[in-house]
């Protein structure tokens, strides 16, 4: 089978199977890997594939009350992480990958390294969590110093920094803000060190809190980021500032949050609302 059959299969997924665009892309990626890496063939350029369309969805957003109620259901480190997601608009992995040196308590800033698109940015550090976060870091530092004495301290460093700075992996500033409870074997280097927490550590707790509170929204950790942006815009924050805090390259990406503002984003009244008072008076007069 070659390009003709592959094109027919991918078109079938979109036309007959009605699959999502991501599912069709996954199938294409799998076929590319099979042909190039296993069969060592190339089926050429696929120009006649009917592509599945990616639908445009509005983001799900918590109300401020819902966001804080969910966070209040979290305990310990999860509570801190929830506040950072909502208070700074962080993605979950951005929060997990935070290093001690990325926190600026004086300026109330967080530097996000290697975010989406491999871009760095600066966002907010909520003043309300400064002291709890300091106490958390004091405990993490104690564990780090104990690991140093036991000989299994250190973290993975990005790119070639481990070669450039051989001892940087043991420095306090490079340690994860939210490290795992126990060291593990790094499969690449074979070193025994502490990695950051697994995403499921917070995902499961947030999901359980949403269910317990009876919030009927298809939501999760990423909803805190959507809520952060929407609530800032609702409070009158300039959209360019929100764009910068979120790390969006194009302001049009940020504009989607104007459609889910808590208040009417179009600054217009529904015809029903405009006519309701007079209609209500007529009903009372008529006795209906």
Image (tube, helix red, strand yellow):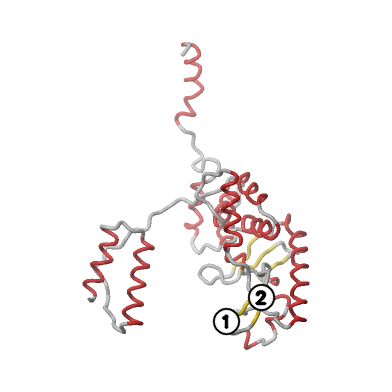
Q: Are marks 1 and 2 in contact (CB under 8 Å)?
A: no
Q: Which mark is residue 215?
A: none
Measuring from the top left, give residue 250's x and y in whole percent: 49, 61
Packing grade of label 1 (10 A; few <14, some 14-19, many >=20) is few
Asked if residue 58 is positioned above or below residue 247 in the image, the reply reads: above
Measuring from the top left, give residue 214's x and y in whole percent: 56, 43
Q: What number of labels is visible? A: 2
Asked if residue 37 is positioned above or below residue 223 in the image, the reply reads: below
Quadrant location of the N terminus in the rendered image: bottom left
Helix, strand, or loop for circle 1?
loop
Measuring from the top left, give residue 78's x and y in whole percent: 66, 58
Asked if residue 170 is positioned above or below residue 89 in the image, the reply reads: below
Q: Residue furthest top?
A: 286
* Residue 221, quarter of picture: bottom right
Helix, strand, or loop for circle 2?
loop
User: Mark 1 or mark 2: which comes first in sequence?
Assistant: 1
Measuring from the top left, give residue 109's x and y in whole percent: 68, 63
Residue wearing tag 1: 159
The residue closer to the viewer here, 205 or 246, is 205
Q: Residue at x 58, y 45 (%)?
A: 63
Packing grade of label 2 (10 A; few <14, some 14-19, many >=20) is some
The residue closer to the viewer here, 140 or 230, is 140
Residue wearing tag 2: 183
Q: Residue at x 60, y 71 (%)?
A: 113
The residue closer to the viewer here, 53 or 93, is 93
Tag in front: 1 or 2: 2
* Label 1 – label 2 distance at C-alpha: 21 Å
């Amino acid at each position: 089978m070659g390009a003709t059959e592959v094109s027919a299969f991918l078109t079938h997924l979109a036309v007959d199977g009605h699959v999502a665009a991501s599912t069709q892309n996954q199938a294409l990626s799998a076929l590319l890997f099979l042909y190039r890496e296993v069969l060592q063939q190339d089926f050429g350029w696929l120009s006649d594939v009917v592509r599945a369309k990616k639908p445009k969805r509005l983001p799900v957003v918590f109300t401020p009350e819902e966001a804080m109620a969910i966070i209040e259901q979290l305990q310990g480190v999860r509570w801190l992480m929830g506040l950072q997601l909502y208070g700074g608009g962080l993605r979950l992995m951005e929060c997990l990958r935070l290093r001690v040196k990325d926190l600026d308590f004086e300026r109330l800033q967080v530097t996000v390294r290697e975010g989406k698109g491999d871009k760095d940015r600066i966002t907010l550090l909520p003043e309300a969590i400064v002291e709890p976060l300091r106490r958390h870091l004091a405990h993490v530092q104690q564990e780090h110093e104990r690991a140093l004495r036991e000989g299994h301290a250190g973290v993975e460093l990005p790119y070639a920094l481990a070669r450039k700075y051989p001892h940087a992996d043991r420095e306090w500033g490079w340690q994860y803000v939210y490290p795992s409870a126990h060291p593990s074997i790094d499969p690449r280097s074979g070193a025994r060190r502490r990695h950051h927490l697994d995403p499921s550590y917070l995902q499961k707790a947030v999901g359980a809190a949403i269910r317990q509170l009876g919030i009927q929204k298809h939501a999760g950790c990423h909803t805190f980021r959507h809520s952060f942006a929407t609530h800032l815009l609702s409070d009158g924050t300039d959209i360019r500032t929100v764009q910068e805090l979120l790390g969006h390259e194009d302001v049009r990406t940020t504009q989607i949050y104007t459609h889910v503002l808590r208040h009417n984003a179009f600054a217009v009244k529904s015809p029903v609302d405009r006519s309701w008072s007079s209609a209500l008076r007529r009903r009372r007069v008529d006795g209906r």
